[in-house]
Image (cartoon, helix red, strand yellow):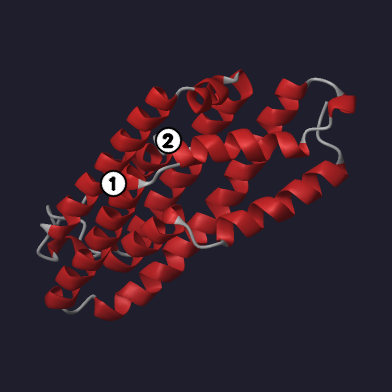
Amino acid sequence: MLLSPEQFLAFLAAALLITLSPGPDNLMVLSFGIARGRKQGMTFGLGCALGCLSHTLLATLGVSALIAASLWAFTALKVCGGLYLVWLGIQALKSRGSTFEAGQADNPNIEPLGKLFAKGLIANAINPKVVLFFLAFLPQFVDASRGNITWQTAQLGIVFTLQAILVFCLLGYFAGRVGQCFMRSPRAGMWLDRFAGGVFVLLGMRLIISKS
């Protein structure tokens, strides 16, 4: 059974507000778009959005509840996620701005879009805060009287993912437009990579040292 119109509209409105509110995913997409270019920002954003499907699957199967109940599992996942973000940041900090030379398909320094997509996918998929968010958020819009709670949860997760794709791709697109102003300056590209790297390192450290 599909979601009722009331369920769908209420959940979509809440999901859009949450996705548009400032957060780690938004900052990562914006920083990549500004520092690397429009296409790169959109690709990374697409990866981040599709990472929500893994959280939907975990929430649907109840695995998220097990992770939330185990301090060890949650801490391990949190540290791994934080270290991964720090690693991404260090890679950007080491850049000399050559990756910002957008539009040059033959430039060997430009990171392949498939690799950027994978980075966004992994960055979102291993974030334990998102795991817990899905566990707490999706059930609020499940109507037990309509039956098949598992299927309802899966539908809600898919709706969240689809709207996240739209929002993150738009963020990456417009961030890339801003970054285009600096395309003719390799030095500006270098500092934009520094900015993106700093954002990732800070987000990673914040995730590692956070108490919840």
Outermost residue toward the front? 211
Query: Is 44 placed left or right of 112 in the picture?
Result: right
Residue 85: mark in rendering: 1
Q: Nearer the viewer, residue 72 or 56?
A: 72
Q: Residue at x 45, y 58 (%)?
A: 26
Give the image location of residue 200, x and y in percent: 29, 55
Q: Nearer the viewer, residue 150 or 121?
A: 150
State whether residue 101 appears in this view.
no
| Quarter in which the N terminus is drawn | top right
- Write down the residue under mark 2: 125
Residue 127: mark in rendering: none
Give the image location of residue 184, x and y in percent: 19, 79
Give the image location of residue 56, x and y in percent: 58, 31
Q: Residue at x 30, y 49 (%)?
A: 204
Q: How many residues crowd mark 1 within 10 Å: few (<14), some (14–19), many (20+)?
A: many
State whether residue 28 appears in this view.
yes
The picture quadrant where one finds residue 57 is top right
Give the image location of residue 28, x and y in percent: 37, 56
